[in-house]
Each structure stands twice: as structure tokens, then as C-alpha cells.
Image: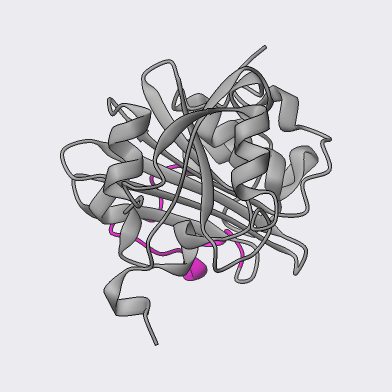
Amino acid sequence: MSGLSWMYGTDLPLLSVTFARDLTARGLLERMGADPDTLAERTQEEFRDEFDDLLYEDDAYVVTAGRYGAWAWVWEHGSWLCVEDDGLLGELSAGTVALSLHANEKPLVDFRYAEDGQLVTGLHTLLGIEPRHRTGRDPHRFDAELRALGACPDTGETGPLGMRGLFYRLAEGLGAGVDPAGLSGGTVLSAQLRPRPDRVA
């Protein structure tokens, strides 16, 4: 099974997952601000006992983490810190590369890619994938890949894969993935993220 193939066609009303290359899962959690008092390996039963009442609260920041190939991943169960905090992805990419995928029922689908502390490319459905709506210092970084997948970045046409499919394939092309067993099987590395100071009311 390829990195995100299990997600194609899966009903995921909220998706918020962040990846970083050449970091451990614990290292990525620490960069994202995991509360060390909550960071632990848990069985599925322990995870449910600890977090079940908070799992889908957007201000509880409950996360699960794992590793796929060279990439660490962090899955936010009810929050969307990966896109809510504009500077976070750049910070996570210091000395490496990082990317985030976010989707909700608005509908919003968002793909962001950062290298060495800077956002390189940001693509999302609210504005579109055509050039005038890109963000980042190299907004055309993935144009060739988008065209190869049947999209037309010049006009915003997403082609047969749709926006979610396009962004999944971009992430897979970079080597990122999530093993579904890391979310629901055996033990899971999990935690709560701490609110960052600039986001506290």
C-alpha cells in the first residue's frame, strides 16, 4: 500500500496532517509544541481512556504521530494547527523539509510545502491553484507535477483526481505517507499540543 492510498475515497470530514523529513515522530511532536506531560506511547485502550472526550475538540489539540519511510507525521484529530498557525510549517522545516495537508467540509483543501525555514508553495481550494492565488517563495514549484497528474495550473482545472487527490499525490510523490495501522493498531505515540503564545487570547 502506497503512502496515502488508503485515504483515496475514505470519508475524512476533517483532515489535518503534518509531515517532516528526517525527523523522528517524537522530534516532530516536540517541534510542534507537544506538552511533555502528555507525550507517551499508549495502547488503543489507554488512548481512548485519556482522550476520548477531547478527541474532536478543536482547542484540545489531541494528536497521534508516527513514521513512514523517511518522514515523520502528526495527525491532528480535531484541530488544524497545521494551517491555523501561518508560521508553524516554516519552523518545522528548519534544516529539513515539511509539508501539511488539510481538508474540511467548508470545503477547504490545503497543501503547503516548506524548506529550511521558509514556505515554498501553498495551494488551496478557497483561492484556487492558478498562479495568481499561490503563496510561498516558489509558488510554481509543483507545476510540472500538477500537469503530469492531469491538472492545469494555469486555469485552476484540477483534472480527474480532484483537489484532494492532487494534493495526496503531491505528498506521495515526495515520499510522505501515513500507515493506517499507526492510527488504529497496537500502540500509538500521542500527545496534546500546547497553544502557542501568539495564539493565546
Residue projecting furthest to the bottom = 201
Looking at the picture, how far across and down is residue 74, in whole percent? 47, 40
Residue in the picture at 60% in, 71% down: 127
Q: Is residue 138 visible?
A: no
Residue in the picture at 57% in, 60% down: 79
Q: Nearer the viewer, residue 28 or 35?
A: 35
Quarter where residue 136 is shown = bottom left
Looking at the picture, how far across and down is residue 3, in whole percent? 58, 21
Looking at the picture, how far across and down is residue 70, in whole percent? 36, 19
117 displayed left or right of 138 = left
Q: Is residue 93 above or below residue 188?
A: below
Quarter where residue 60 is shown = bottom right
Residue 34 within the magenta-colored segment of the rendering:
no
Residue 135 within the magenta-colored segment of the rendering:
yes
Q: Is residue 156 above or below residue 169?
A: below
Q: Nearer the viewer, residue 121 or 66?
A: 66
Q: Nearer the viewer, residue 48 or 158?
A: 48
Residue in the picture at 59% in, 45% down: 50
Q: Which residues are magenta?
A: 128-142
Q: Quadrant of the N terminus?
A: top right
